[in-house]
Amino acid sequence: MDQKVFIMAKQVLTFQQVLTDLERKVYYPVYFLMGEEPYYIDVISDFVQQKILDETAKEFDQTILFGKDVDINIVINTAKRYPMMGGYQVVIVKEAQLIKDWEYLVYYLEKPLKSTILVFCYKYGTPDKRFKWFLEIGKVGIVYESTKLRDYEVIPWISKYCKTKNIGIDEKSLSMLAEFLGTDLSKLVNELEKLILIMPSGNKRISPELVEKNIGISKDFNVFELQAALIDKNVLKANRIIRYFAENKKSNPLVVILSQLFKFFSDLMIYHYLADKNPSLVAAELKINPYFVKDYQKAAQTFKAWKTMNIISFIRETDARYKGIDNPSTEESDLMKELIYKILH
């Protein structure tokens, strides 16, 4: 997924282009890094903190401030200093979302110091983009919004990350990692780097066995294997998997399992009514990896449209009962058993 940045020429850059500019020493006086996804904000700010100044210059010309400890006037006064050792002073404001009185920043933005690289790290949200001070930043520097990955973007993101590391990964490993780690990019990167680090010498591929052994995800007992068992109408396998879930509730919360099943069968309902079932068009419509289209092709044979609609209702009912609606005492494991029975019969 492209992370977008808007600069004074209104040009749209990807995250990688922003990083490339920094690597080429193309600097702006102000960087406002904001958004729900902290990973990209951290990568950019870490680069500025670690790479722009040498170690000696950092002692004199690099300042790290925290929003909970400063107001905007302190930030402005710090930014107005001239560098002592070289061509640039670097000022990084972490936790910038905690700062108040942003309107005073306008006065600095009227004539920002070209020798200062001022970086704001505004995480987990965005300010009101109609404010004058916010609009002024875009005229002199970079305003970058880092957005969360959506569920359907996780697998392509992992695949792309592995390619940048010259590491292969199979589809089952992709599914396991996406299911277990979700959309938290920092967590994804940490776990992928861990797998790459412990990969046996000469091995350049992440396998389900490697994932299972080192991240704690079972390659045989996960929601994707449950879906496969349901599609095959393999009653024994489906019940083995839900029994494993019941015995390992912490790593297999019912709410996550229900969410994944609901998404799969909701997408299956869409698949049933697609006029053109060409695999590439299906992948685009459902926003899935083309590899998984075959699962929907097969599932459509097992579960006709009317049955799929009933299954969606069963999942909704189970979710409501799990949350205590019309269910004073039924255990999670029993709710899951009932749901699987209804799906398969």
Image (tube, helix red, strand yellow):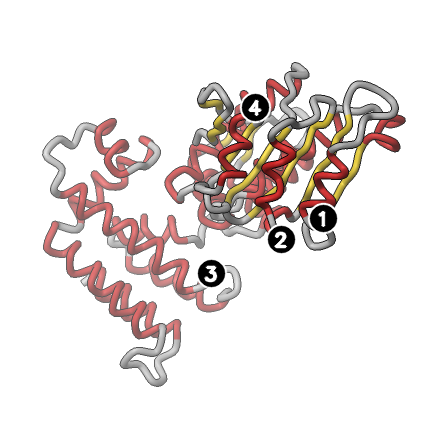
Q: Which residue is mark 3?
A: 252
Residue at position x 50%, y 46% in the image = 127
Counting residues from the N terminus, which is met first, the one under dot 1 or under dot 4? 4
- Work out whether 216 lies above or below 203: below
Q: Which residue is mark 1?
A: 66
Discs 2/3, front? 2
Q: Which residue is mark 2?
A: 98
- Horizontal arrangement in the rendering, residue 327 relative to residue 144 (left or right): left
Counting residues from the N terminus, which is met first, the one under dot 1 or under dot 3? 1
Residue 206 rendering spot, x and y as whole percentages: 55, 34
SS at circle 3: loop
Q: Quadrant of the C terminus?
A: bottom left
Residue at position x 47%, y 31% in the image = 3
Q: Quadrant of the N terminus?
A: top left
Q: Which residue is mark 4?
A: 18
SS at circle 1: strand
Q: Are marks 1 and 3 in contact (CB under 8 Å)?
A: no
Counting residues from the N terminus, which is met first, the one under dot 2 or under dot 3? 2
Residue at position x 87%, y 25% in the image = 84
- Three-letter code, disc 4: Val
Q: Are marks 1 and 2 in contact (CB under 8 Å)?
A: yes
Q: Residues within 10 Å of mark 1 (few under 14, many from 20)?
A: some
- How far apart are the two marked residues, 1 and 2, measured between alpha carbons? 8 Å
- How far apart are the two marked residues, 1 and 3, measured between alpha carbons? 37 Å
Q: Are marks 2 and 3 in contact (CB under 8 Å)?
A: no
Residue 237 rendering spot, x and y as whole percentages: 35, 56
- How far apart are the two marked residues, 2 and 3, measured between alpha carbons? 35 Å
Counting residues from the N terminus, which is met first, the one under dot 1 or under dot 2? 1
- Horizontal arrangement in the rendering, residue 113 relative to residue 315 (left or right): right
